[in-house]
Image (cartoon, grey):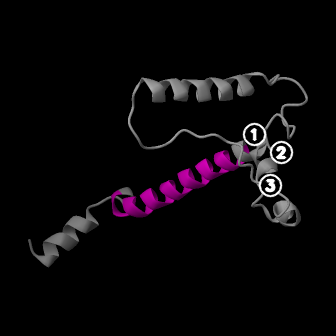
Amino acid sequence: MTEDQLIADARGLSPWQRHRFIVLIGVTIVIALFLVGVALALYASSGAAQLDLSRPGYVSVRDKAVQSDDFEGFPTSGPIDKDTIKQFRSLYEKQSKEATNVDSFGGDVMSDKALSIDTPSK
């Protein structure tokens, strides 16, 4: 194919065919902005924004947050046998009971005690 043939072929294309890459980029940016807007709306409406200490408004209380060492986690490595399954189930049931004991429609759902972020008892 010569250069003249390529130019003739390019002139025969419709405006949509000539600019489809730019349109694709534009549509992609619009979709990304829409999804970011949805994510931010969910972040604000779910209440997660009130718990986020990394926000600039919470700089003064960030150092007052206390990390609790009371959490008993399950080891990420090791053998899987009946004892480890029993240990996992007991830890899971303990956390499950704490999570389901909260009245979901009550006023105390977002309290520090319900979220297990109250001051540690020693």
Q: Earlier in the sequence, mark 1 or mark 3?
A: 1
Residue reaching furthest to the left: 1
Identify residue type, mark 1: Ser
Q: Residue 1's image quarter? A: bottom left
Decide whether residue 24 is among the magenta residues. Answer: yes
Decide whether residue 29 is among the magenta residues. Answer: yes
Question: Residue 118 in the image: x percent, y percent?
Answer: 85, 43
47 to 5, vertically: above or below: above
Q: Earlier in the sequence, mark 3 or mark 2?
A: 3
Camera-side residue: 99 or 74? 74
9 to 73, vertically: above or below: below
Residue for point 63% across, 23% down: 93
Q: CA distance from mark 1 to mark 2?
A: 32 Å
Q: Which residues are magenta?
A: 17-41
33 to 93, vertically: above or below: below
Question: Residue 38 in the image: x percent, y percent?
Answer: 66, 45
Provide the residue designation for mark 2.
122
- Say the numbered circle drawn on residue 46: 1
